[in-house]
Image (cartoon, rainbow, N blue to C red):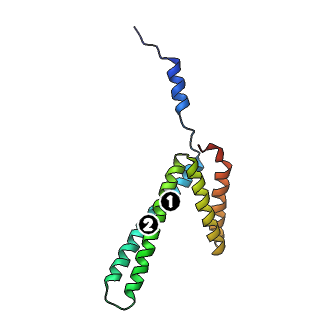
Amino acid sequence: MAKRKSRRSSKRTAAAKPAARPLGITIICALNWLISLVGIVGGLGLFAAGTILGLLPIPFVGLIGAFGSLFGIVLLLVSLVSAVVTYWLWNMQQRGYQWVIVFTGISALLNIVSFNIVGLIISGLIIWYLWKNKTMFK
């Protein structure tokens, strides 16, 4: 006897499918992950270079090395947080949407202070695009 497919099971699987991720979100996530990767590698490099400079017995080089190590740790932590937030955005989670808006807003403010018009336009476009699609995040 041939088995029949239950109509109930097909409805459950169709309802369980998450909403499709828009191409714009995919592009934002890919670029954020690339930037996070560069930040992680750069943070590790700065930390390593600062540690090596800190070991040299040359006056004031140890202080420069300490600041390099500290900046490397901060860059590493910010990049790791950015990667996690991007993962949340990739999965269309509300908290990812909210944190990307916050980080992009901070980036926009820094772009204003540094007179970076291109960066300000990109930040504005990201905020506008996410705001336009905010109903897609669960």
Quadrant (top left/top right/bottom left/bottom right) for the N terminus: top left
Q: Residue at x 53, y 18 (%)?
A: 7
Q: Is residue 123 above or below residue 113?
A: above
Query: Crowding near pointer 1: few (<14 within 10 Å), some, many (20+)?
Result: many
Q: Residue at x 65, y 47 (%)?
A: 134
Does 86 sit left or right of 137 as displayed?
Answer: left
Left or right, 81 with reference to 65: right
Which residue is drawn at the image coordinates 58% and 61% (left, top)? 103
Q: Measuring from the top left, give residue 81's x and y in whole percent.
A: 48, 60
Name the amino acid type tagged 2: Leu
Q: Is residue 47 above or below residue 84?
A: below
Residue bearing mark 2 = 76
Which percent across, then down, holds residue 135?
65, 44
* Residue identifier under label 1: 82
Q: Whole-Å distance between the Cαs marked 1 and 2?
A: 10 Å
Q: Quadrant of residue 122?
A: bottom right
User: For numbered disc 1, what is the local secondary structure?
Assistant: helix
The amino acid at mark 1 is Ser
Secondary element at image label 2: helix
- Callout 2: few (<14), some (14-19), or many (20+) C-alpha neighbours within 10 Å? many
In which quadrant of the rendered image does the C terminus lie? top right
Q: Residue furthest bottom?
A: 59
The residue closer to the viewer here, 117 or 76, is 76
Give the residue at x 52% y 48%. 90
Residues marked 1 and 2 touching at CB (< 8 Å): no
